[in-house]
Image (spheres, helix red, strand yellow):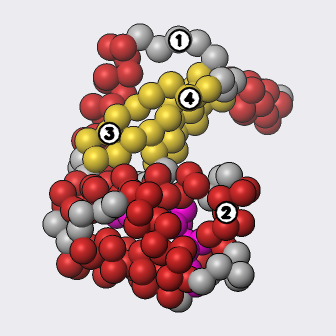
């Protein structure tokens, strides 16, 4: 539900703002979204005992956005009691900007170190496949190698245990 509401607001922002303004909005939304990780600040921003105008003014005073569109959005979200959607707004705006600019980031999971050259080859191959630019970074351990680019829905997975299992199944079928 929150994601659907956030998509509507982001759609409206995409129609009225330039790419530079959207980048600035994204930075601000991500910063505000981090406030919701602190229970004390979240309680203040979501408290029914504090007037919505005061909550909006707290955010505006803390971050002092230059863009009147962002100022109006913060006031509107406070008025409609929707300040809690900032994390979803940040996430959706990040996705939409990545799709607009065709710049994506992804993760590589493996149990061995990849050379920079190998990582560059993976980035180049995936970039050609999705028609954009992909930046990959090492994110964690995996039994084999796994590449994920969430925004475009790309996932490549070579698991040693899965390959071993398939090999055993093939041998058993042949017997």
Q: Is residue 88 magenta?
A: yes
Whichever of callouts 3 and 4 sits on the residue coming sooner in the sequence is 3
Picture quadrant of residue 141 = top right
The answer to whether residue 94 is seen in the rendering is no
Distance (Cα) linking label 1 and label 4: 11 Å
Indicate which disc residue 113 carries: 1
Q: Secondary structure at mark 4?
A: strand
Q: Nearer the viewer, mark 1 or mark 4?
A: 4
Q: Main secondary structure of the magenta part?
A: helix
Q: Position of residue 148 (x, y in %)?
A: 51, 41
Residue 21 position (above or below residue 119): below
Q: Is residue 162 above or below residue 16?
A: above
**Residue linked to disc 3:** 134
Could you say whether the residue bearing mark 3 is in a helix, strand or loop?
Answer: strand
- Is disc 1 placed on a helix, strand or loop? loop
Marks 1 and 3, how far apart at CA? 19 Å
Horizontal side of residue 58 vs 13, given as left or right:
right
Q: Which residue is mark 2?
A: 42
Q: Earlier in the sequence, mark 3 or mark 2?
A: 2
Q: Residue furthest bottom?
A: 80
For label 4, the residue is 139
Number of residues whose C-alpha sits closer than 10 Å to that of mark 4, classed few (under 14), some (14–19) or many (20 or more): few
Q: Secondary structure at mark 2?
A: helix
Give the label, 3 or 2, closer to the camera: 2
Q: In this picture, which residue range is highlighted in magenta?
A: 81-96
Identify which residue is drawn at 51% across, 30% down.
Answer: 108
For marks 3 and 4, give the one nearer the viewer.
4
Q: Is residue 89 left or right of residue 112?
A: left
């Amino acid at each position: 539900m929150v994601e659907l509401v956030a998509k509507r607001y982001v759609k409206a922002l995409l129609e009225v703002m330039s790419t530079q303004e959207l980048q600035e909005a994204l930075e601000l939304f991500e910063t505000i979204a981090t406030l919701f990780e602190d229970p004390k600040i979240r309680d203040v921003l979501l408290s029914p005992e504090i007037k919505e105008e005061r909550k909006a003014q707290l955010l505006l005073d803390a971050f002092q956005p230059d863009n009147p569109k962002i100022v109006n959005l913060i006031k509107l979200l406070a008025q409609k009691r929707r300040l809690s959607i900032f994390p979803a707004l940040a996430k959706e705006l990040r996705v939409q900007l990545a799709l607009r600019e065709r710049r994506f980031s992804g993760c590589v999971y493996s149990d061995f170190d990849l050379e920079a050259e190998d990582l560059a080859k993976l980035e180049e191959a995936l970039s050609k496949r999705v028609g954009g630019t992909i930046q990959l970074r090492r994110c964690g351990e995996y039994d084999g190698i796994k590449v994920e680019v969430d925004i475009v829905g790309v996932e490549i997975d070579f698991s040693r245990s899965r390959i071993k299992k398939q090999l055993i199944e093939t041998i058993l079928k042949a017997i």
